[in-house]
Image (cartoon, rainbow, N blue to C red):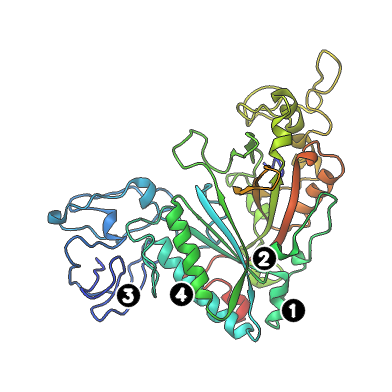
């Protein structure tokens, strides 16, 4: 844990909530940036049956705000006689699938998330992996635009909008040997070193392929998870899967890429900001780098960090703040000001001691204390029930993004390993490192430049 800071109607014999042609063949999805797909049957659905897209507006309701990341033009308006209630702005918000970078990296934190790793099955290689990524990309594009899956949709999200859904794909170290692409494996994907705080379960670590799903509605997120799993078919099997959550948008004035974790602390205060001039070079692989297929991509370090909440909650609030180095109430440094005010590391109190203790988590993880090392934290909290002794199995699904983990996550974690005051209250239980290629252009699938290069 670091302080880094045209309407598409369904045919009458089609399943409700799907976009199909007259003969029931799935229609072409609307792209993530709102480009309409091929025209479909104009036949109206049975009375009272509406697709996810038709719920996004009513006759006369125009200009529905989809937010800066949205672009869901082409959503159909139902006839006035049907009196469909439009979705709220929260449900209607759509994130673009195609773009320079994959979605789910710089987007605001979502209320619900799923992390899942897959291993290719015996006999599956580069050809099967390419077909799988093609299927996954097509499904992600449809679902992110608020469409049903192209085949065998479960109808779980039939009456919901896109709800800020993002689906992100990455490759693990083992993927390259399985597909005969070892020469294309990035040096930055070398296995992470061991850390003294690690208590890693190998069965819940790493994997050939990694998928991150996030949405502001739990059913929309689960719908995407189920569709991705079904699309894997015989090419890949689930290795591990984890479920997470954050606050719902609008539940607090605190928005963006920081949120409270289960310790009650604001998490990610010193995240790099997209407006900063060096943001891209810290978080994304530059064009023309090595390997070239990773241009505009990033590396995700994924860790399941168990919080020993019973021990933590026994600490008085003042001691909790000393462990972190920030006020629990508003995330401000102990040296004063607001959350974003720089921390005065040299300030001493009346007793002559440093106000921010030398082993405080926020002090140790500062970029200026780690040679400028920075990473973009985008985590989810988790709670998976209780252990036999009654302790909560809860904590943080830590996800951080950087252009090179050897210059981002690794030096910071090594320093934490040597004396972080927070270490006695957390346990790293699983770990993974994944190469996440740049976004797919129109007509491409994610990873195409690797798999067909």
Q: The residue tagged with tag 2: helix, strand or loop?
A: strand
178 relative to 12 in the view: left or right: right
* Residue in view at x 72 percent, y 24 percent: 316
Counting residues from the N terminus, which is met first, the one under dot 4 or under dot 1?
1
Identify the residue position indicated by label 4 in the image: 443
Q: Which residue lies furthest to the front in this view?
A: 388
* Residue in view at x 66 percent, y 52 percent: 400
Give the Cα distance between marks 3 and 4.
Answer: 16 Å
Q: The residue tagged with tag 4: helix, strand or loop?
A: loop
Q: The residue tagged with tag 3: helix, strand or loop?
A: loop
Q: Which of marks 4 and 2 is in front?
A: 2
Mark 3–mark 1 contact, CB under 8 Å?
Answer: no
Identify the residue position indicated by label 1 in the image: 182
**Above-or-below relation of 178 to 277:** below
2 relative to 7 in the view: left or right: right
**Above-or-below relation of 193 to 187:** above
The answer to whether residue 157 is visible is yes
Q: Nearer the viewer, mark 3 or mark 1?
A: 3
Counting residues from the N terminus, which is met first, the one under dot 2 or under dot 1?
1
**Mark number for residue 27?**
3
Give the Cα distance between marks 4 and 1.
Answer: 26 Å
Counting residues from the N terminus, which is met first, the one under dot 4 or under dot 2?
2
**Above-or-below relation of 347 to 413:** above
Counting residues from the N terminus, which is met first, the one under dot 3 or under dot 4?
3
């Amino acid at each position: 844990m670091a302080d880094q800071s045209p309407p598409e109607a369904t045919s009458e014999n089609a399943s409700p909530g799907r976009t199909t042609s007259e003969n029931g063949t799935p229609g072409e999805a609307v792209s993530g940036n709102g480009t309409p797909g091929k025209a479909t049957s104009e036949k109206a659905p049975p009375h009272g049956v509406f697709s996810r897209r038709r719920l996004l507006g009513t006759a006369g309701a125009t200009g529905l705000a989809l937010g800066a990341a949205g672009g869901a033009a082409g959503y159909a308006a139902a006839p006035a006689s049907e009196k469909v209630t439009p979705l709220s702005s929260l449900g209607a918000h759509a994130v673009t699938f195609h773009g320079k970078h994959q979605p789910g990296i710089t987007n605001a934190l979502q209320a619900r998330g799923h992390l899942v790793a897959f291993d290719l099955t015996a006999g599956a290689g580069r050809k099967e992996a390419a077909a799988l990524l093609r299927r996954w990309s097509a499904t992600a594009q449809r679902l992110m635009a608020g469409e049903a899956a192209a085949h065998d949709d479960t109808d779980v999200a039939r009456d919901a909008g896109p709800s800020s859904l993002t689906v992100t794909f990455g490759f693990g170290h083992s993927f390259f040997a399985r597909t005969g692409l070892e020469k294309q494996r990035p040096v930055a994907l070398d296995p992470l070193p061991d850390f003294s705080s690690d208590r890693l379960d190998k069965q819940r670590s790493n994997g050939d392929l990694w998928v991150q799903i996030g949405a502001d509605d739990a059913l929309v997120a689960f719908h995407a998870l189920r569709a991705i799993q079904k699309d894997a078919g015989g090419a890949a099997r689930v290795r591990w899967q984890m479920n997470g959550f954050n606050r719902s948008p609008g539940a607090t004035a605190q928005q963006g890429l920081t949120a409270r974790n289960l310790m009650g602390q604001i998490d990610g205060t010193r995240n790099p900001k997209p407006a900063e001039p060096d943001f891209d070079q810290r978080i994304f692989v530059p064009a023309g780098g090595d390997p070239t297929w990773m241009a505009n991509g990033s590396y995700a370090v994924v860790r399941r960090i168990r919080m020993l909440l019973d021990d933590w909650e026994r600490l008085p609030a003042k001691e909790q703040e000393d462990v972190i180095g920030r006020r629990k109430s508003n995330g401000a440094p102990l040296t004063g000001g607001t959350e974003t005010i720089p921390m005065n590391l040299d300030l001493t109190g009346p007793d002559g001691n440093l106000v921010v203790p030398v082993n405080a988590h926020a002090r140790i993880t500062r970029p200026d204390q780690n040679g400028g090392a920075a990473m973009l934290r985008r985590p989810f909290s988790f709670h998976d029930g209780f252990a036999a002794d009654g302790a909560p199995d809860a904590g943080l699904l830590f996800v951080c993004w950087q252009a090179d983990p050897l210059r981002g996550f690794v030096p910071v974690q090594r320093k934490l390993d040597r004396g972080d005051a927070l270490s006695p209250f957390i346990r790293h239980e699983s770990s993974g490192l994944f190469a996440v290629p740049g976004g797919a252009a129109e007509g491409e699938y994610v990873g195409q430049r690797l798999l067909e290069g």
